[in-house]
Image (tube, rainbow, N blue to C red):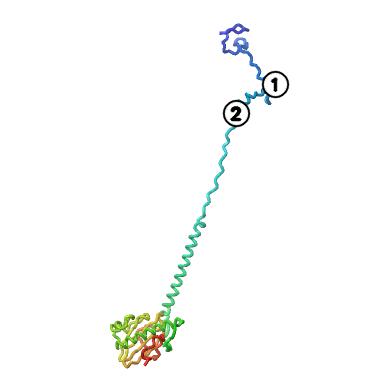
Amino acid sequence: MNTCPTCGKEVRPLWPSCRACGHLLMAAPAPLAPVGASVGASGAPAPSAEEQFFAPAVLQPVVNVAPPSAPAPYTHTTRIAGSGALAGKWLALIGMIMFVAAAIGAAMFVFKPAADTKHQTPVVLAPRMPTAGLPTNLDVIVRVEAESTRHTALQAVEQVGSADVGQLTKMQPNYKWIAANQSSADPHTVSVAQNPGSVTVAVAASNHDVCAFGQWSTAGTVQYVTMAHVDSCAAANAPSSGWSSEAGGAASDLPDDTNP
């Protein structure tokens, strides 16, 4: 224990002053800088070079800067992204419509004449000389085709000498031979009828409006008649008038009876 020099009371070594009289027991601290030395702006002595070197760093608070927002991803709209496929579908649809329209037009060409025949009076067409070369008119083309088949069918009839369908099929297998009361449907089908002293054939054109009739007699004569707007191109429905010796058809199919 120590004794206070002022009051004589006991004091502890760690006490800075006497608790009885308040006497300072520790030496006063020496000033940091001598009188007249330069001081800092705040009144404190300026630090030496060593103090400045070892001066603690002043840490600034960390400022968190938000990263720039990413731009919105670019996406195609449904209309833009599918525009190519949509255009392809429209082209396909237009193509289908055009195809159907063409098919309907072709069907009307084939079937309309047959329907109109029911509302028109059958007429005998004027005899025609055999056509040389390739005709360009569609009506002429279908008529020449039927008349050429008629000529070939009459040649087979002349060789067989009757309307026997079985024998005619063997003689000319390229055609379909049918009975007299059955109607020819195309230039490859021949309706044949046995008459007293003659045989009659009937061949339909591809437009189902023209029918070419031919008749071979046992006397060796051949006559022809071509009609339009007939209801049925059957040999049994051959007309009683309008017959001619003009074979028609193509010049390359001239009947044998015209060449003595």
Q: Position of residue 159 (x, y in %)?
A: 31, 87
Q: Quadrant of the C terminus?
A: bottom left
Other residues around mark 2 within 10 Å, as few (<14) / some (14–19) / many (≥20): few
Residue 29 falls in image quadrant:
top right
Residue that carries the numbered disc 1 in the rendered image: 37
Q: Which numbered tag is attached to residue 57?
A: 2
Who's the residue at 32% across and 90% down the image?
198
Q: CA distance from mark 2 to mark 1?
A: 25 Å
Report helix, strand or loop for mark 1. loop
| Nearer to me, 219 or 200 | 219
Q: Amino acid at mark 1?
A: Ala
Compared to residue 256, the image places residue 64 above or below, namely above
Considering every residue shown, the one lying at the far top of the view is: 8
Q: Tell me the element at label 2.
A: loop
Most foreground residue, 151 or 252 = 252
**Rendering coords of residue 201 (x, y %):** 34, 86
Which image quarter: residue 46?
top right
Counting residues from the start of the chain, the first of labels 2 and 1 encountered is 1
Q: Which mark is residue 238?
A: none
Structural crowding at the residue carrying mark 1, measured as other residues with C-alpha within 10 Å and reported as few (<14), some (14–19) or many (≥20): few
Residue 63 visible in the shown view: yes
> Above or below — where is 1 with respect to 200?
above
- Does any portion of residue 227 appear in the rendered image? no
